Image: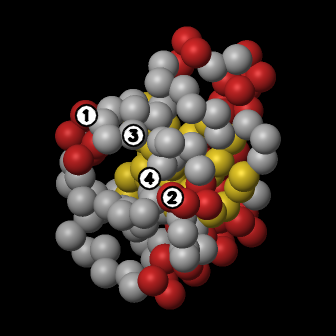
Amino acid sequence: MCELCDARAFLKGQEWKILQDDEVTVNYSKSPEVDGHLVIQPRRHVERITELSFNEWSCISEALYRYSKAVEKALNERAKGDEVEKVYLWCFCRSPYNHLHFHIKPKMRSHKAEGPDFVDYKDPRRQLDEKGQKSIVDKIRKSL
């Protein structure tokens, strides 16, 4: 079974799940490269966007919109002069899971990468421990 299909297995022992309904799961990234990095995926195993039902795509689209706004709001509340400049979205489906998933990755003004280079960007200042990351998750939940 695809590990991403079973969000409970994927997030075993972690409190990073933000939403799980019949169609979509929203998680804080297991290995965030920047603060506020979220992963959105359909619950059903899907390898291509064209395999999504219209309802699944509608739910994912709504989640991308709502959670992009929530991440921006949550991070700007703690920004201290380094606000979110833009929120990048992208879609992957690659090994080892081959499960379609989308990333929400906020770019702060201080981040040095732009455009396609931001996909692999890791914020060298990101030093939040697990408690700090959970604090961001709580702020995102409250921002919805």
Mark closer to the chain start, 1 or 3:
3
Numbered disc 4: secondary structure: strand
Residue identified by numbered label 4: 106
Q: Going 32% across and 41% down the picture, which residue do you hit?
A: 96
Q: Amino acid at mark 2?
A: Phe
Of the residues shown, which amino acid type is indicated by label 4? Pro
Q: Which of the labelled discs sits on residue 116, or is there none?
A: 1
Q: Are marks 3 and 4 in contact (CB under 8 Å)?
A: no
Is label 1 in contact with label 3 (beta carbons under 8 Å)?
Answer: no
In the picture of the structure, the residue carrying the numbered disc 3 is: 97
Secondary structure state at the residue bearing disc 1? helix
Label 3 residue SS: loop
| Residue labelled with disc 2 | 10
**Image position, residue 77 (x, y; %):** 59, 72
| Image side of residue 37 versus residue 23, left or right | left
Please state which amino acid type lies under the numbered disc 3: Tyr
Specify which label sits upstream in the sequence, 3 or 4: 3
Up-down relation of residue 113 to residue 95 (above or below): below
